[in-house]
Image (spheres, rainbow, N blue to C red):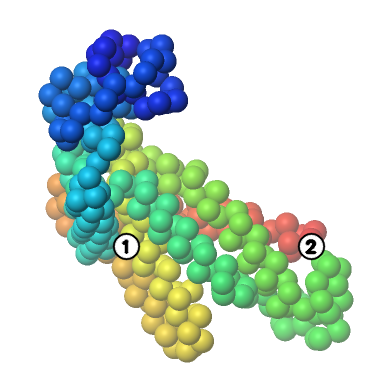
């Protein structure tokens, strides 16, 4: 990277390895055959720098060049995102298979898909008051009288059930995105145990886990979205649909990625989702428990 060609057209004032000298006159051609990368100084062999990946573009592009570039970037970007989202939700396992086969440029990366849909999900949840948490004060299993209820709530620092619901919901929305950075790798580990003879490495199972979670968060976002419309039955329908979608997704994705029969995929899905479900519930309870025990 230090063997910059003597005629490298360094930007005036740009940090390069070569001592600052007068920049040579810009060449009129778009890509000089003997040019060096403007970014890292490596010799160029084609349209992209082999060392850093930057596209070889003239320092003084024409307007036509800029317009063409913008149009191409936007259409590439759009179709890549649209294609990726479509495949993510409608073809479980497809994107993971593409990734494992090394065909990656056409698709949005698994991590980016995961981050996009988890952020969208938690943003929608935080917009809906209480985040779906329901607090009911009971006395030995029976509904508490209003004075008992008020006394208990006040002992925990709350004035009403709604206030406690909002506090717990806010805590879940704040903590779950962080906890997911442990839960997603844990899910990948469960898959790696169930599919230990697949020949895949752990990071390859992580791609599977990221795609699956991206799809679930995206689908699950329909529930808070439905809650925002304040049509009660719509929320139930969304909850039911996503409840069915998640296990079916795992079955189809396991089948596609690991080449399983439907029967085997069903067995593995049952195993993985049961253990994972218990862990997720345990984590959720652990996040809520401090409010019940000690209040805020
Ligand atoms: Zn370069």
SS label for mark 1: helix
Q: CA distance from mark 2 to mark 1?
A: 36 Å
| Residue on which disc 2 sits | 295
Residue at point 70% right, 67% down? 167
SS label for mark 2: loop
Left or right, 262 with respect to 89, comes to: left
Between 127 and 198, the one nearer to me in the picture: 127
Left or right, 38 with respect to 101, comes to: right
Left or right, 288 with respect to 189, comes to: right
Specify few, some or many for label 1: CA neighbours under 10 Å numbering under 14, 14-19, or 20 or more. Answer: some
Specify few, some or many for label 2: CA neighbours under 10 Å numbering under 14, 14-19, or 20 or more. Answer: some
Left or right, 156 with respect to 179, comes to: right
- At which x and y percent is residue 9? 29, 23
- At which x and y percent is residue 15? 43, 22
| Quadrant, the C terminus | bottom right
Q: Earlier in the sequence, mark 2 or mark 1?
A: 1
Q: Is residue 150 above or below residue 122?
A: below
| Quadrant, the N terminus | top left
Between 81 and 194, the one nearer to me in the picture: 81
Q: Quadrant of residue 89?
A: bottom left
- At which x and y percent is residue 232? 49, 88
| Residue on which disc 1 sits | 247
């Amino acid at each position: 990277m230090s063997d910059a060609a003597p005629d490298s057209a360094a930007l005036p004032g740009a940090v390069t390895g070569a001592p600052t000298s007068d920049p040579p006159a810009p060449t009129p051609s778009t890509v000089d055959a003997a040019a060096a990368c403007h970014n890292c100084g490596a010799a160029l062999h084609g349209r992209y720098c082999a060392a850093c990946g930057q596209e070889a573009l003239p320092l003084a592009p024409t307007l036509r060049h800029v317009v063409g570039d913008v149009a191409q970037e936007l259409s590439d970007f759009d179709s890549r995102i649209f294609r990726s989202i479509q495949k993510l939700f409608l073809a479980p396992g497809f994107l993971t298979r593409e990734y494992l086969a090394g065909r990656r440029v056409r698709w949005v990366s698994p991590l980016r898909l995961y981050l996009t849909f988890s952020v969208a999900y938690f943003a929608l949840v935080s917009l809906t008051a209480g985040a779906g948490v329901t607090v009911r004060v009971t006395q030995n299993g029976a509904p508490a009288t209003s004075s008992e209820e008020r006394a208990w709530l006040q002992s925990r620092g709350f004035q009403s059930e709604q206030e406690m619901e909002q506090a717990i919901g806010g805590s879940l929305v704040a903590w779950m995105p962080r906890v997911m950075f442990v839960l997603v790798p844990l899910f990948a580990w469960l898959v790696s145990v169930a599919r230990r003879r697949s020949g895949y490495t752990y990071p390859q199972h992580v791609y599977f886990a990221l795609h699956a979670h991206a799809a679930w968060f995206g689908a699950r976002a329909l529930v808070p979205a439905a809650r925002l419309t304040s049509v009660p039955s719509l929320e139930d329908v969304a909850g039911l649909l996503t409840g069915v979608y998640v296990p079916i997704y795992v079955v189809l994705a396991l089948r596609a990625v690991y080449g399983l029969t439907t029967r085997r995929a069903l067995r593995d899905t049952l195993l993985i989702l049961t253990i994972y479900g218990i862990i997720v519930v345990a984590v959720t309870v652990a996040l809520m428990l401090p409010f019940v025990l000690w209040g805020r």
